[in-house]
Image (cartoon, helix red, strand yellow):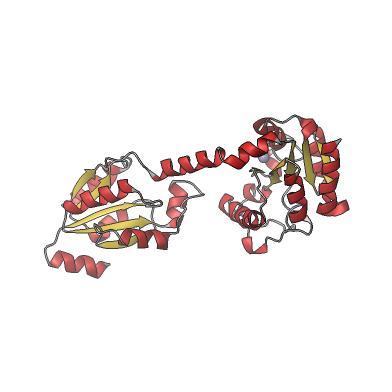
């Protein structure tokens, strides 16, 4: 990239620079990059790395990995060069390449002064370009979440919604690995798939309530926890099992929170959000803390390690009928 910049400058072409995450590309991006290209002779785009997007946006973003986002941006007619941006801010790249123009999308206002000063100091110019579209990646995601929240199967199951099964994760659904943070170590326990399918078929909804003290202790991050869940949900989803929600306590024992089982915080929150009375909620777990939490919240409890998951599912079904 250094060579490319040097060659373009040697040929007296004006280089424009812009940056962003370009996670879900939409018309706003295309128009803004097109307008940016009209201001210069060559447009270079720095695409935020996955790590930087996770840091400055949300641990669950980006949706599309950095290499693929770069390929998509590079395919646009307006774009002449693409670079990866490891930092959250473009400061170091601006100083390295000193583009004639630093072009910002209209929705970027924060930090523009600081970068602007740097650009003006070496003799460059800052331009702001508006896309003219209302769409943004965040709005697209919101809309998808809305579709999900109003999906037809939800309405259908609501009619036959007979109760809520709150499932412990480690040692109940998947093999218990202390401080699990490696998706490759996810192993669904015997009887879990069939058991969950039975519960679901009986009109019970499924949610997870899990203590994740490893986050609070700094052994792994929320992203690691989510990656493990993703692996598990993918395997369950492939078999037609739908987990409606995952509640987790990220605190360490020392923090004395109200969510870590045997406290009842996660369970009462789940019952509230699902609009279910304790008599119609079932707590399945493998530990004393699970049983204690379920009982204190007024739920019916089933311990899985005595009977195995298949038998536990049958036990819930008979309780639900009773
Ligand atoms: Zn907690």
Does residue 302 appear in this view?
A: yes
Residue 72 horizontal side relative to residue 199, left or right: left
Residue 98 horizontal side relative to residue 19, left or right: left
Image coords of residue 194 (percent x, y): 76, 54
Q: Is residue 309 above or below residue 289?
A: below
Q: Say which quadrant the C terminus sits in.
A: top right
Q: Is residue 293 above or below residue 238?
A: above
Residue drawn 74% across the image and 46% down it: 201
Quadrant assignment for ligand 1: top right
Residue drawn 66% across the image and 53% down it: 240
Task: Work out whether residue 156 or residue 73 is closer to the camera in this orientation and state it.
Answer: 156
The image quadrant of residue 235 is: bottom right
Image coords of residue 297 (percent x, y): 78, 32
Image coords of residue 284 (percent x, y): 79, 45
Does residue 171 appear in this view?
A: no
Residue 95 horizontal side relative to residue 71, left or right: left
Residue drawn 82% across the image and 38% down it: 320
Task: Work out whether residue 202 or residue 119 is closer to the camera in this orientation and state it.
Answer: 202
Q: Say which quadrant the N terminus sits in.
A: bottom left
Residue drawn 40% across the image and 51% down it: 24
The image quadrant of residue 134 is: top left
Image coords of residue 224 (percent x, y): 59, 55
Q: Is residue 10 above or below residue 78?
A: below
Q: Residue furthest left?
A: 12
């Amino acid at each position: 990239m250094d060579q490319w910049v040097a060659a373009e400058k040697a040929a007296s072409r004006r280089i424009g620079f812009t940056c962003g995450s370009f996670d879900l590309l939409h018309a706003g991006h295309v128009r803004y990059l097109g307008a940016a290209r009209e201001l210069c002779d060559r447009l270079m785009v720095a695409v935020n790395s996955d790590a930087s997007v996770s840091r400055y946006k949300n641990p669950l973003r980006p949706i599309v990995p950095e290499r693929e986002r770069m390929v998509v941006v590079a395919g646009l007619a307006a774009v002449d060069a693409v670079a990866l941006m490891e930092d959250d801010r473009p400061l170091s790249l601006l100083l390295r390449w000193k583009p004639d123009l630093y072009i910002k999308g209209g929705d970027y206002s924060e930090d523009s002064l600081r970068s602007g000063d740097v650009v003006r100091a070496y003799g460059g110019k800052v331009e702001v370009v508006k896309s003219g579209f209302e769409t943004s990646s965040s709005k697209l995601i919101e809309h998808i979440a809305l579709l999900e929240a109003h999906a037809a199967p939800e309405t259908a199951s609501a009619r036959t919604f007979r109760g809520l099964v709150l499932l412990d994760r480690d040692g109940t659904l998947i093999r218990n690995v202390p401080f699990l943070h490696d998706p490759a170590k996810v192993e669904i326990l015997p009887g879990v798939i069939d058991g969950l399918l039975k519960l679901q078929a009986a009109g019970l909804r499924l949610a997870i309530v899990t203590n994740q003290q490893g986050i609070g202790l700094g052994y792994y991050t929320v992203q690691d926890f989510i990656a493990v869940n993703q692996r598990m949900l993918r395997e369950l989803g492939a078999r037609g099992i739908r987990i409606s929600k995952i509640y987790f306590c990220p605190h360490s024992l020392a923090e004395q929170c109200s969510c870590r089982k045997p406290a009842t915080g996660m369970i009462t929150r789940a019952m509230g959000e699902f609009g279910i009375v304790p008599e119609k909620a079932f707590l399945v777990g493998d530990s004393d803390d699970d049983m204690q939490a379920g009982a204190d919240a007024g739920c019916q409890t089933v311990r899985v390690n005595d009977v195995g998951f298949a038998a536990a599912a049958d036990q819930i079904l008979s309780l639900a009928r009773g």
